Amino acid sequence: MDNSAFTLLRQPNVIFGPGKVRLLPDLIAGYGRNVLVVTGVSTLEQSGVLGKLFEQLHSRSLQYGHLTVSREPHPELVDRAVSRYRESGIDVVVAIGGGSVIDAGKSVSAMLLKSDSIERYIEGLDGCIQHDGRKVPFIALPTTSGTGSEATNNAVISKVGVDGYKRSLRHPEFVPEIALVDPELMLGAPAGLTAASGMDAGTQLIEAFVSPGSCRFTDVVAWSGLEHFNRSFLRACTDGAGDIEVRSAMAYAALMSGIALANAGLGIVHGFASSVGGYCDIAHGVLCATLLASATKENILQLRQTGDNPEALTKYAAIGRLFSGCENLSQDGACDALVDTLLSWQEQLDFPRLSSYGLRSSDLESIASRTRSKNNAVELHRDQYMSILRARL
């Protein structure tokens, strides 16, 4: 595959490092006097970060509204928020939280200048139209090392149920103006959330690296992220949870995953994020965590059987050598080592099975029929989809 030609989305102005959250009030003031702050329900408030921010905004005579997000954003949440704040003269939207919070803030910033529902612009829905990209400026501050949404041009919107969906509001202009990444904000994240969000970042790095849409730029970005992920993921979930260097490495890995995926695309695990995630109420990071090993195993099997995309096998092998620490493995041995490593993380960190979220064998056919992934390393079909899902039921 010739990956010498490529185009790139614009990237946010990235401000990265411990303690950088102190810059936020001045960054907000650079856009105007009226800010909408989007957060989760309680963590920032309990840590004192939110109260301190509001005090700083008040001391600068800045006006602010506050929107809380308790789950992955759904159309009604965005439409209600936009209806409430559309006439408030919001100059900038700031989202401080995990991927769901950032996606909610990104969606609100995109819809404040519109008079209709967000569902009109969500890709793949009947009758959808392309958003024109006009929005209120947006600043993203992640508090988990997961989605990389601080660097992407889309916001994921979910509606859960038999006819549900998980799809994107997308436009090149939706890349945040500023990504302020402060690893200190991630120090309090619990182990379960750290593991799930971390596996989201790891999945994105792997899928972008082996994607047919990858290029020299995304390969370098994804590999750099994989190196940081490899040395920090397990420690962040265990004895290194309070180590700022570990959290910094994971924050960097997540940021790189966002840049890589925005430009290279993602594979089958994120295809399931749409079909499974629309069918049952499972957190995106948990879905990535529980499906990555079985999906990677199936991809490698199909690549070996078909002979398609040999570069992807070479890349899987490179990741296998990195994760296993065994540089002298053959290609087959390294690919097997990658699957073994992913399976060991799955067992060590006790990732939940799909059945614990109510999925049954009888649901798999319907889910497989809705699953698509245009940037997977190898073309998969219904039988392969069913195999991946059954392995984690």
Image (spheres, rainbow, N blue to C red):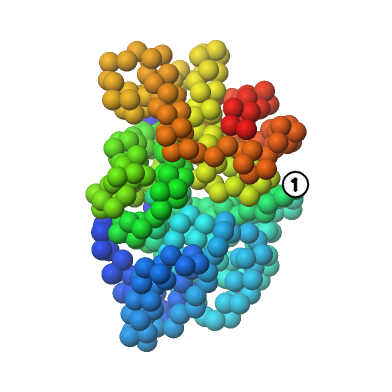
Question: Based on the displayed image, in which of its 4 quarters is residue 274 positioned?
Answer: top right
Residue at the (75%, 48%) spot, across then down: 163
Whole-percent x, y for residue 216 in the image: 36, 33
Whole-percent x, y for residue 251 in the image: 34, 50
Q: Is residue 60 left or right of residue 291?
A: left
**Position above or below: 68 against 228:** below
Amino acid type indicated by mark 1: Val
Label 1, residues with CA under 10 Å away: few <14, some 14-19, many ≥20: few
Asked whether residue 110 is in view, the answer is no
In terms of depth relative to the viewer, which is nearer, 314 or 341? 341
Whole-percent x, y for residue 1 in the image: 45, 23
**Position above or below: 371 against 237:** above
Question: Based on the displayed image, in which of its 4 quarters is residue 44 positioned?
Answer: bottom left
Whole-percent x, y for residue 294 in the image: 53, 27
In terms of depth relative to the viewer, which is nearer, 226 or 372? 226
Q: Is residue 11 left or right of residue 362?
A: left
Residue tagged 1: 162
Question: Which element is circle 1 on?
Answer: loop
Residue at the (74%, 53%) spot, across then down: 127
Residue at the (66%, 46%) spot, across then down: 280
Q: Is residue 328 left or right of residue 388?
A: left
Question: Based on the displayed image, in which of its 4 quarters is residue 276 positioned?
Answer: top right
In terms of depth relative to the viewer, which is nearer, 360 or 275? 360
